[in-house]
Image: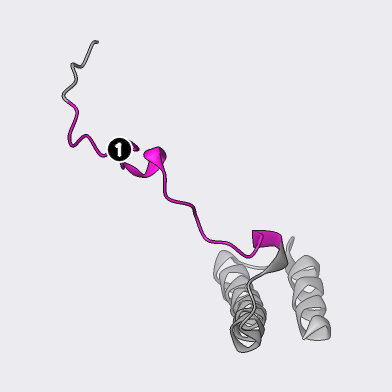
Amino acid sequence: MKKEISDKVAEIRSILQTASAEELKSKTQELSTSLQKIGQHLYGQQGQQGQPNPEQGGQGPQPGPEDGQNPNNEGPVEGEVVE
């Protein structure tokens, strides 16, 4: 995959000054498709492992007042908007 991406980038660089807009659009679309394949591959690996990403800390978001919950369970609180 790395060689495929490198080749496509090199091809785009080589035609950058001389190619038409349509040609550049076509080549960048091919590159984008190849990059999406890499993303799918990486996403698939993470899902297969069943392990959370270590960069994410292994935990989901913790519920709290910032999630719209009242920490004292007092019910809705009325407020006034000041402009």
Q: Farthest residue to the bottom: give it.
A: 48
Left or right placement of residue 1 versus residue 53 in this view: right
Q: How many numbered marks appear?
A: 1
* Mark 1 Cα-neighbour bin, 10 Å: few <14, some 14–19, many ≥20: few
Foreground pick, 44 / 63: 63
Choose top left, top right, bottom left or bottom right for residue 66.
top left
**Residue 64 included in the magenta stretch of the image:** yes
Q: How far from the left and from the top, in percent, is residue 38?
A: 67, 80
Q: At label 1, which amino acid type do we have?
A: Asn
> Which residues lie in the magenta part?
55-77
Foreground pick, 10 / 15: 10
Q: Residue at x 77, y 72 (%)?
A: 9
Choose top left, top right, bottom left or bottom right for residue 68.
top left
Q: Secondary structure at mark 1?
A: loop
**Residue 83 included in the magenta stretch of the image:** no
Q: Residue at x 57, y 69 (%)?
A: 25
Q: Vertical placement of 57 versus 29: above or below? A: above
Q: How far from the left and from the top, in percent, is residue 46?
A: 64, 80
Q: Residue at x 22, y 34 (%)?
A: 74
Choose top left, top right, bottom left or bottom right for residue 17.
bottom right
Q: How far from the left and from the top, in percent, is residue 33?
A: 59, 80
Q: Vertical placement of 5 versus 66: above or below? A: below
Q: How far from the left and from the top, in percent, is residue 67?
A: 37, 44
* Colour convention: one colour
Q: Main secondary structure of the magenta part?
A: loop
Query: In the rendered image, which quarter contains the N terminus?
Result: bottom right
Query: In the rendered image, which quarter contains the C terminus?
Result: top left
User: Which residue matches tag 1?
Assistant: 70
Foreground pick, 18 / 80: 80
